[in-house]
Image (cartoon, rainbow, N blue to C red):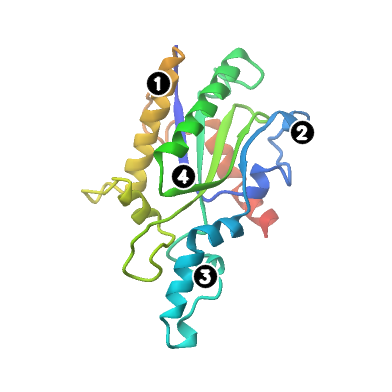
Amino acid sequence: MKKTISIRIGKGSISHNNRKFVAKNVDEKRVKDNMVLCCDNLKDVYDDLFGAALAEYNAKQKRKDRRIENYLDHITNGKQEKPFYELVFQIGNKDDTPCGTPDAEIATDILREYYDDFLKRNPHIRVFNAVIHLDEATPHLHVDFVPFATGQSRGLSTRNSLNKALEQQGFSAKTNLETPAKLWTDSEKQQLAGVMIKRGIEREQLGTHDEHLSVLDFKKQKRAKEVEQLDS
């Protein structure tokens, strides 16, 4: 048996993931079937990750206007980094792995096992929200995380930086066509494929990403503006 793998990194919506609002493509009767794997407060996570480094940084600043009162607000209002990122993982599509079928149950078990290994494998990725959605067309896993790089000489000694965090995990771009994020997601696809193999499912590799957008990706793009409006 072969199935495709879809992994996408981008901006997430906690209110959507945790069903504080229900989009049109969600079956409200099946919301109860969703599996919440992690649900922490983002502010608390920032205090835990960056609190000590922020206090150390501010103590060194002789000018008050150089001090950072709230690191989460500082990142949110900045342009270099995002407050958090999201990965979305999907096995198969609506035709070969629709929710409510035995194939979907297997896919859900694979995503759950993969998630546990993901946490162990990524020491510079702090997951604060994770859920497997079973109320849409196909089972898929949302992982929301804050990347953090340690031992930094500029700014906070521990700071939010996706590229730096991934580089510290060994994903350094060697050409202009590569980025740490691409190398990382490619590696995670291989990891997910490895879990699938144990369940007798081989990864099916299609053509270009643009030609074969999964239903999940298509719908996420289509409702992006709706999500942003509801969040605001």
The quarter of the picture where the N terminus appears is top left
Question: Type of residue at label 1?
Answer: Arg
The residue tagged with tag 2: helix, strand or loop? helix
The residue tagged with tag 4: helix, strand or loop? strand
Which of disc 2 and disc 3 is earlier in sequence?
Answer: 2
Which of disc 2 and disc 4 is earlier in sequence?
Answer: 4
Q: Which mark is residue 203?
A: 1
Q: Which mark is residue 28?
A: 2
- From the viewer's perspective, is residue 77 above or below residue 98? below
- From the viewer's perspective, is residue 10 above or below residue 35? below
Which of disc 3 and disc 4 is earlier in sequence?
Answer: 4
Between circles 4 and 3, the one closer to the viewer is 3
Q: CA distance from mark 4 to mark 3?
A: 22 Å
Q: CA distance from mark 4 to mark 2?
A: 26 Å
Q: Quadrant of residue 107?
A: top right
Q: Residue at x 44, y 60 (%)?
A: 160
* Residue occupied by mark 3: 74
Q: Which mark is residue 9?
A: 4
Question: Type of residue at label 2?
Answer: Glu
Q: Residue at x 40, y 21 (%)?
A: 203
